[in-house]
Amino acid sequence: MQIDLPEPLLRLLRTEPVLGRAYLVGGCVRDALLGSELKDIDIEVFGVGYERLASALRRHGRVDLVGRAFGVAKVTLDGAVYDFSIPRRDSKTGQGHRGFGIELEPDISPRDAAARRDFTVNALMLDPRSGELLDFFGGQADLEHRTLRHTSPAFDEDPLRVLRGMQFASRFQLTPAPETLERCRAMVSTCAELPAERVREEWFKWAARSTLPSAGLRFLEATGWMVHFPEIAAMRGVPQDPEWHPEGDVFEHTLHALDALVRLTEWRDAPEPTRMVWSLAVLTHDLGKATCTQKAERQGRQRIISPGHEIESARLAESFLNRIQAPHAMTQRVLPLVANHMAHFQEASDRVVRRLARRLQPETVQALSVVMTADASGRPPKPAQVPETVTVLVAAAERLRIADTAPRPLLLGRHLLALGLTPGPEIGRWTQAGFEAQLDGVFHDLIGAHAWLAQQPEFPESARALAQAFRPSE
């Protein structure tokens, strides 16, 4: 098997004597077999000590010894960074993801080194000189059959591997082997050992890189680990009106909506942080149905309804995001998308659209339309499509030039100071009142803002006269 490596790295691997037993390992070999772009290239070097490896690498490029305890050296070649590491043996010394004793073992066999990896599809090794694939645990066959299988009994030592299984299942559309599910179920109680930031990292990879997000959530359900994310677990079994949602309960709808999201061109073309925000918004958009759903008579018959669920969903979304310690900036982007995902059912008047764009900050009407489209497309056998109401909403926002931004106030403090008002709370009150009037469509430019001020009886009389006399040239 040949792999297309950058020339500086290939030259190093072929000419440096210390690297005679160096192998490409882990995700880069998996990705090469899948025909995917190689993003992170890791090399494991056998038969040499750490200091000798670092000394040899310094002859070829800058070396950063960022992982001395783990035997890792980062080498910069022609602007690209590669991880070179010494094989190690981990031994369980305590609870948690960090409860390991680490001992570098340069003379360990490649098979024993591969056995410490989590899944067979990540335990593959490749000799970059001969092209020989080292596959000790059937990883290539598992990849071909899209099977997620643990590599060895050492899997049980690190509970983070279960959450890695979640995001791998979603990224590569893998089905877990029964014996792997059994091991994960036996580890349910160990989730509490994990630092929240490590849990968050796996959720973020799921949110940014999934090709079939539902596979990861079904993995969590099958392993029993969904119990650790109660806001999501509560959606299972919550009924929906079959006329609007023939696909099943709220959990099933969410899975279909997530899978629909990642098929959208807008999601695939978006930068990774935005993909994460949109995925998390769709994941949590219906959390509130778990507490808001009820039966009520509508048009002479009993219907299943969930009034106000979007606001409750935003509250529960915040709870989930806090649980995984999502950054505040990300939470502030997700919550307005969740709270407003039903806004396209309102009349798309100029006033309504302006106020919606303002509520969505720092997100936008265009971003909301992606979430709404995924929501509407998650109802098979109903066809996936952009709802007409969403099209109308986006068209109105584009006409108002606020599809990709929020309205900005026309009347600013400096304008009020120029009319003779003194600095203080009164400035803030009038700029806020002016912005509300602007959102309502009372005025559309600065001339109109001054004319509005001149008509306000509470506005200082001397300032009203100046406002009335305002001209653009001023």
Image (tube, helix red, strand yellow):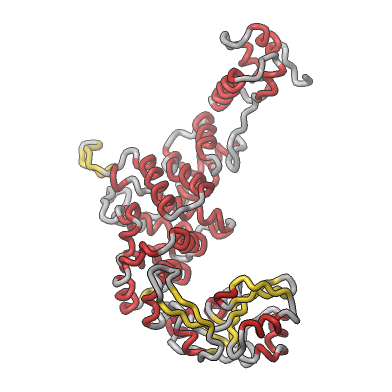
Q: Residue at x 39, y 80 (%)?
A: 154
Q: Position of residue 361 (x, y in %)?
A: 54, 40
Q: 411 and 268: which one is in front?
A: 411
Rendered position, 128 above or below 330:
below
Q: Position of residue 222 (x, y in %)?
A: 31, 68
Rendered position, 338 above or below 414:
below
Q: Position of residue 90 (x, y in %)?
A: 46, 79
Rendered position, 249 above or below 185:
above
Rendered position, 93 above or below 410:
below
Among the 4 quarters of the image, the one containing residue 73: bottom right
In the drawing, does residue 290 fall left or right of residue 270? left
Q: Residue at x 69, y 84 (%)?
A: 10
Q: Residue at x 77, y 19 (%)?
A: 474
Q: Is residue 341 visible?
A: yes
Q: Residue at x 42, y 77 (%)?
A: 146
Q: Is residue 143 visible?
A: no
Among the 4 quarters of the image, the one containing residue 431: top right
Q: Position of residue 375 (x, y in %)?
A: 42, 51
Badge count: 0
Residue found farthest to the right: 473
Location of the N terminus by quadrant is: bottom right
Among the 4 quarters of the image, the one containing residue 377: bottom left
Q: 46 and 300: which one is in front?
A: 46
